[in-house]
Image (cartoon, coloured by chain):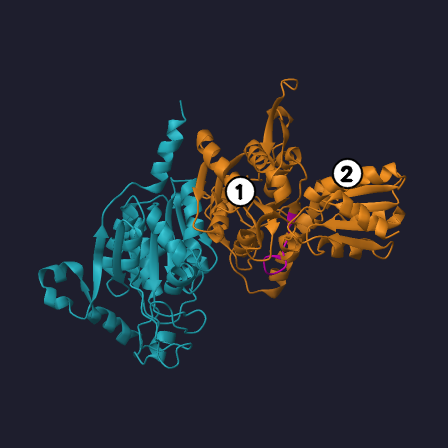
Amino acid sequence: MSNNKSYKLLQGNEACVEGALAAGMKFFAGYPITPSTEIAELSAQKLPKIGGRFIQMEDEIASMAAIIGGSLTGLKSMTATSGPGFSLMQENFGYACIAEIPCVVVNVQRAGPSTGLPTSPAQGEVMQAKWGTHGDHPVIALTPNSVQETYEMTIKAFNLAEKYRTPVILLMDETVGHMREKLTFKDESEIEIINRKKPTCAPEEYVAYRPEEDMIPPMASFGEGYRYHVTGLSHDETGFPTNNNKLAGEQVERLINKVEQNIDDFSYYDEYKMEDAEIVVLAFGGVSRSAMTAIDEMRENGIKVGMFRPITMWPVLEKQISAIADTAKEIYVAEMNYGQYFYEVDRIAGKKCPVKKIVKVTGELITPNEIIAAINGGK
Amino acid sequence: MNASEITQKYYRADKLPHIWCPGCGHGTLLNSVVRAIDKLGLNKDEVVVVSGIGCSSRAPGYLDFNTLHTTHGRALAFATGIKHANPKLHVIVIMGDGDSSAIGGNHLIHACRRNIDITAIVFNNNIYGMTGGQYSPTTPHGDFGTTAPYGNIDSTFDLCNLAQGAGATYVARGTAYHANAMDKLIEKGIQNKGFSFIEGLSLCPTYYGRKNKKGDAVKMFSFLKDSCVDKKVVEKKPELGENKVIIGELYNNPKPEYTESYQVIIDKFQK
């Protein structure tokens, strides 16, 4: 079967839906917003054909709520939005974190703040993805830079959500969402699918939020006979609210640790011409494509430059970024915002080598020439 | 089934006593919910009770079903996801007045409009109790709250009119005093294949009552008794409805249900 590849020319947004369906998505709730709308449209078209369910909600607050509800019944669930909608989703995103509900939230970033520049590309929600909802909480966010990678990372997003019982953000940008490229579909046998752990005990023995050794509690679906309680209040292992400060603190620590201590399991990144690179461009999503062109040109002029491209944005790939700083003479963080991920990179690498910004907030992709100019200007 | 058998069967006894103040009407309304479920003989494993935030929202925690305590105002949006994802489940939503009609007003009208098979019950105590007595969309005009120290100048929502106007197919109003009638209204609401909206007039002696000099819980229960009259009575003798709150079944007009309509689409693709 592996020779029987199927190909299609698709948008990033379309590839996201293909990936979601390949991962087992059965439920989608959303609200129209450019530049993510194709994800909702294609989900509306495809889900009923496989017995899945789509619903257009009254806003993004409700969309996020509905996918949590869908996931609680056992269906793999997703929503998709852009900046303004992502802001509205933050409230219930935090609910999914504390109640440990697997789901996937796609944000196809456009230029902000507020309504901003609909719908020009941006990467302005790098920090919001991590800190958008109130309180300390775990976040997994993945950023693809191509149509193919969008397909593959959407599958991984579902797998990570299921494995770690946590919402996972697919942090796209308009460039990747609306770009058309060849997508090579994977054969079913090539796709790894992870499903949430279910309880194996009898219902009367089920302690809904008692973590196993991997820090993750098995999750029963509503309707299966395990009648349990779910709340956004700090709760003990029974799932019922507690005002015990020690237990509340332990809960937050476990939620964060179950994700961050497993970072090696999902440290996705790419390196481009890094073998002998003295100058490193750290770029992600759409900008990384400009960076590669810039690097090719600079290499022709004998400049030893390469790119490190995090795909896993959150938690930050500290180990890898720190290792780069051991050999690099300088690092440039190129991002379509006013400098967000820069602060993470500077925190990790700044004591070892200079870390500089290449930023742009005009609603346009950073061009290869702008990257070259910034690096040459630094000479 | 007597009261203690009902408690044994449907309550999580280890979670009692509840947090509600002495004299609060919520416990009485919750008992009506449980008796209606019992009367209908629903399988406990297939019942989901969802709530938002506020005094009313603590209700599901006491009940031995699949229970979901969500965020303020959003209960119906979570419930919509549950019902749409698994239409076999009986989804019952318990909300407060501010919860359902202020912060959750948009979700309420759209749940009504979809006519999705959810039974929404509002425990209306005319005040934000959990936060200490601020005026809500159902605080009567002119009454007092901690944020209406000079009298409430807002107009008051008629939640049943709102629900009917938005498309709910079963609309009823009961009270914590008229418990037997309330049982039946909820029972019929659950049976309605579509969105059912039931307003349960509750009372809050602690905040609303004290702030508005309404007397103790007994006096407030008596007020519920005296100020409400059933729609059927008024239909025969309209003069009895003057200056009264009309209770009973207010609207019952079945229409195609949301998840069933969606199933028709799914079935088209099943060869």
Color of chain B here?
cyan
Whole-percent x, y for residue A105 in the image: 57, 46
Of helix, strand and loop, which one carries label 2? helix
Give the orange chain's letter. A
Whole-percent x, y for residue A307 in the image: 80, 42
On screen, B17 above or below B266? below
The residue lying at 64 percent from left, 28 percent from top is: A182
Of helix, strand and loop, which one carries label 1? strand
For disc 1, the marked residue is A78
Q: Who is closer to the viewer here, A294 or A156?
A: A294
Q: Number of numbered discs present? A: 2
Q: Is residue A319 magenta?
A: no
Res B106 → quadrant: bottom left
Q: Chain of mark 2?
A: A
Whole-percent x, y for residue A52 in the image: 46, 34
Is residue A54 among what the camera can see? yes
Is residue B1 among what the camera can see? no
Res A225 → quadrant: top left
Q: Chain of mark 1?
A: A
For the stretch drawn in magenta, the main secondary structure is loop
Q: Who is closer to the viewer here, B21 or A71?
A: A71
Tell me the number on the disc at residue A293: 2
Span highlighted in magenta in the image:
A132-140
Q: Tell which circle, 1 or 2, labels the residue nearer the N-terminal end.
A: 1
